[in-house]
Amino acid sequence: MPPLVGQTTYDRAQFDAAQTIDAHADSIDRDYPANFVLSQWGDNRMYNYFVNGESRSYGYAQTYHGQFLAAEDPDAWYDRFQGRVGYVVITAQENVPPGNTTYTTLHEGYGVGANGTSATGHYQLLGTADGVRTFVVVPGAVIQVSTPSGEPVTASTSVTVAGDTHTYARTAAASNGSVAIRVAYPGEYTVGNQSVSVTTTDVLQGNQTQISP
């Protein structure tokens, strides 16, 4: 592993985030570049030094991290990442522009729709402490629902974030009599008057589960 030079002082929450990502990547056998960490540029070398040893690969974060945080739809960036980003760390910022941004959705809403934000389908929160939010980027499981009426369909479950339980709900529009709802968390989902179980493997591999309304 190359030596880490430059800034070497980080707070405990940042160090814990790096350790959390490293342990998670090991548990699911993610190697570089699939375990690349996208973070603010000043911290990027540290995160990737601990997680994958590629501390020199901070140019990507320097170019794209700001654009990512300012974007309206974080899920739209999943395809843009093209497998290049496996984890995202978002740190509390001052003077954040108002509106629906990735920063608001992930940092303030934890990606689960808390605090009046929208829930995401590709970002699963791994940890939060002292303004540092740590996410794993996932394909997300797809719940396929037949809907002859053509109405949008919602799938919901409960997730616990920082000791609080939130309703994680994802809604998708119908197309040709069916709806595909992408979810970033495992759990037992309620869809209409039915339920469907989504596993961790489903979320990590992008598996599909089909149910009838």
Image (tube, rainbow, N blue to C red):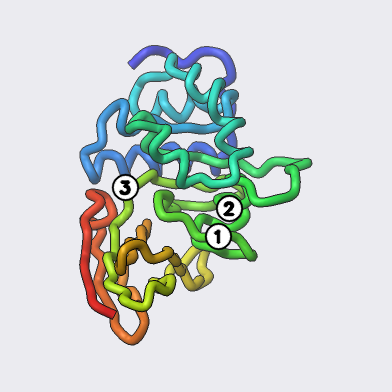
Q: Is residue 35 left or right of residue 165?
A: left
Look at the picture and state if 168 lies above or below 102. Answer: below
Residue under numbered circle 1: 118
Between discs 2 and 1, the one toward the N terminus: 2
State the count of labels: 3
**x, y percent for residue 164:** 53, 70
Element carrying mark 1: loop
Element carrying mark 2: helix
User: Which of 110 and 52 lies nearest the eye of the viewer?
Assistant: 110
Q: What is the quadrant of residue 187 in the picture?
A: bottom left
Mark 1 is on which residue type?
Ser
Residue drawn 65% across the image and 51% down it:
100
Q: What is the quadrant of residue 25 in the picture?
A: top left
Residue under numbered circle 2: 105
Residue 202 visible to the viewer = yes
Look at the picture and state if 199 lies above or below 155. Answer: above
Quarter of the image that includes the C terminus: bottom left
Residue under numbered circle 3: 139
